[in-house]
Image (cartoon, grey):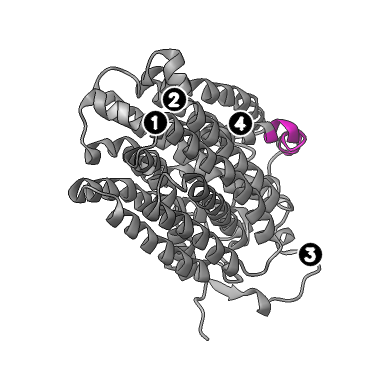
């Protein structure tokens, strides 16, 4: 069967003694990007010194991950109050969650370029500062500030999303699946806490604005944790190139980004399968974030109870997000896992069609485990389907650019369909179709192949 020139079957490779995740070199070549010369011994020592702070790096990864969904998940239980305050329709109200997704897609291509110029650690720090500022701007009185703040929030999350897989591939090459499980679990934990606390914080702080603004504090704490990382990275650099970025030259390590070979990633069918898998699982996730509490309250459940069910669904995502990447790292093919997580989500979504409030806790559990597994699998496939940290970062940027632009259509389209039909039957039916498409894409993206530059 013919294959794309950038892909090759793992079965055709020489048999290696290491497991799949140990095929990557532990250290990137220490070559200066601008001069194409070997760095001085002082620079090499500083770069290696940065690697001697694993606890600091681990803390930064966990704190950054906690913020990657918290500022979005906390909006969903309050969406009714926000819409009532501004007099928004269902379609216009969905823009509160759609605009961050659009900017998550638009800002994703900038992440690798910014990281090459300023360094991964510095860009992660800037992303957290941007996220903190966006959260605060979102609660300013004008309606425009609500949407502008959402744009900043989405941009900050985009930088975090794109750079994290490459960072893990680079600094934890032999534990990539475990680290992916850790950061996705922390990300889901932050979303769970945000969803569960949204209504209590609204009551305690005098309204939805106080509840949303409270999530600027975790972002500020995470930024403080990344500040020493950024300083350590800059100390071991020349020409403004951060030490921790895997720098490459055409002679030493292959084609530069933007070269003809670099642009070839967009011509890889496997890369597009991973990208669309990422996009459709994100679409399902953000439709759930935007509309699940509303579906439950429309069926007679109280706002507080709906918020707790949604928080529970987010909480059980941690099980899927932790276990699925670990299983994926031990399997040559992840096709079975992809079908399984899609089937779990489809079962829970079908339950919302049959008895939304009556079986809410069961549907929430099925959707949650499936969603956690699907996002963990999507992020893990960005690592497993690539041969080095550079290609992994580029695939992450491609997948999250197009994936989040695709996902952004979900809440808006379902809100418009709900407003047009006056019910949830057709929107939920469309979500079941998306689950079927996700399973089909997983059969392609989960194949035992590697994208090579």
Report which residue position mark 2 lands on.
199
Mark with earlier residue (2, 1): 2
Q: How many marks?
A: 4
Dot 3: element: loop
Nearer mark to the viewer, of 2 and 1: 1
Specify the segment rendered in magenta: 44-58
Residue at far right of view: 17
Check if mark 2's residue and mark 1's residue have beta carbons within 8 Å: yes
Residue at 75%, 38% in the rendered image: 48
Mark with earlier residue (3, 1): 3
Mark with earlier residue (4, 1): 4
Q: Eyeballing the image, is 260 above or below 88?
A: below
**Residue 401 placed where, x, y %?**
41, 50
Nearer mark to the viewer, of 4 and 1: 1
Q: Is residue 247 magenta?
A: no
Question: Counting other residues with Cα less than 10 Å from the Cα at mark 4, is it few (<14), some (14-19), or many (20 or more)?
Answer: many
Dot 1: element: helix
> In this orientation, does residue 143 appear?
no
Question: Counting other residues with Cα less than 10 Å from the Cα at mark 1, is it few (<14), some (14-19), or many (20 or more)?
Answer: some
Q: Which mark is residue 18?
A: 3
Residue at far left of view: 420
Mark with earlier residue (3, 4): 3
Nearest the viewer among 262 and 223 is 223
Nearer mark to the viewer, of 3 and 2: 2
Mark with earlier residue (2, 4): 4
Dot 4: element: helix
Q: Is residue 45 magenta?
A: yes
Report which residue position mark 4 lands on.
63
Query: Could you give the CA–CA distance between mark 3 and mark 4, rounded to whole angstroms?
Result: 31 Å
Residue at 34%, 43% in the rendered image: 102
Nearer mark to the viewer, of 3 and 1: 1
Query: Could you give the CA–CA distance between mark 2 and mark 1, rounded to whole angstroms?
Result: 8 Å
């Amino acid at each position: 069967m013919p294959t794309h020139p950038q892909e090759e079957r793992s079965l055709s490779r020489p048999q290696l003694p290491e497991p799949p995740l140990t095929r990557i070199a532990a250290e990137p070549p220490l070559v200066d990007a601008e001069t194409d010369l070997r760095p001085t011994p002082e620079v090499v020592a500083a770069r290696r010194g940065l690697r001697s702070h694993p606890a600091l790096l681990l803390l930064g990864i966990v704190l950054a991950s906690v913020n990657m969904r918290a500022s979005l998940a906390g909006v969903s239980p309050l969406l009714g109050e926000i819409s009532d305050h501004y007099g928004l329709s269902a379609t216009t109200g969905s823009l509160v969650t759609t605009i961050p997704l659009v900017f998550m897609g638009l800002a994703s291509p900038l992440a690798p370029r910014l990281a090459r110029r300023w360094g991964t650690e510095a860009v992660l720090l800037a992303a957290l500062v941007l996220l903190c500022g966006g959260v605060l701007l979102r609660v300013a009185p004008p309606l425009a500030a609500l949407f502008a703040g959402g744009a900043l929030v989405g941009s900050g999350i985009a930088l975090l999303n794109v750079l994290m897989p490459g960072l893990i591939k680079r600094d934890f090459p032999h534990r990539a699946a475990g680290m992916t499980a850790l950061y996705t679990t922390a990300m889901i934990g932050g979303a769970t806490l945000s969803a569960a606390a949204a209504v209590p914080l609204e009551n305690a702080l005098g309204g939805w604005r106080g509840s949303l603004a409270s999530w600027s504090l975790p972002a500020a704490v995470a930024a403080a944790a990344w500040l020493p990382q950024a300083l350590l990275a800059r100390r071991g650099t020349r020409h403004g190139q951060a030490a921790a970025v895997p720098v490459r030259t055409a002679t030493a390590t292959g084609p530069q980004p933007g070269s003809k070979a670099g642009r070839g990633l967009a011509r890889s069918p496997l890369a597009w399968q991973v990208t669309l898998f990422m996009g459709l699982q994100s679409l399902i996730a953000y439709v759930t974030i935007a509309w699940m509490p509303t579906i439950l309250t429309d069926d007679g459940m109280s706002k507080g109870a709906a918020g707790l069910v949604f928080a529970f669904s987010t909480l059980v995502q941690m099980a899927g997000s932790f276990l699925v990447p670990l299983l994926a790292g031990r399997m040559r093919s992840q096709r079975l896992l992809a079908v399984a997580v899609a089937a779990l989500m489809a079962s829970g979504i079908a339950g919302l069609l049959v008895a939304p409030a009556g079986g809410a806790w069961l549907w929430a559990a099925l959707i949650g485990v499936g969603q956690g597994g699907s996002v963990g699998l999507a992020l893990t496939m960005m690592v497993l389907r690539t041969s080095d940290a550079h290609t992994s970062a580029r695939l992450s940027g491609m997948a999250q650019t197009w994936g989040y632009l695709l996902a952004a259509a979900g809440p808006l389209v379902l809100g418009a369909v709900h407003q047009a039909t006056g019910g949830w039957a057709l929107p939920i039916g469309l979500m079941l179709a998306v689950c079927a498409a996700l399973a089909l894409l997983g059969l392609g993206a989960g194949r035992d192949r590697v994208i090579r530059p």
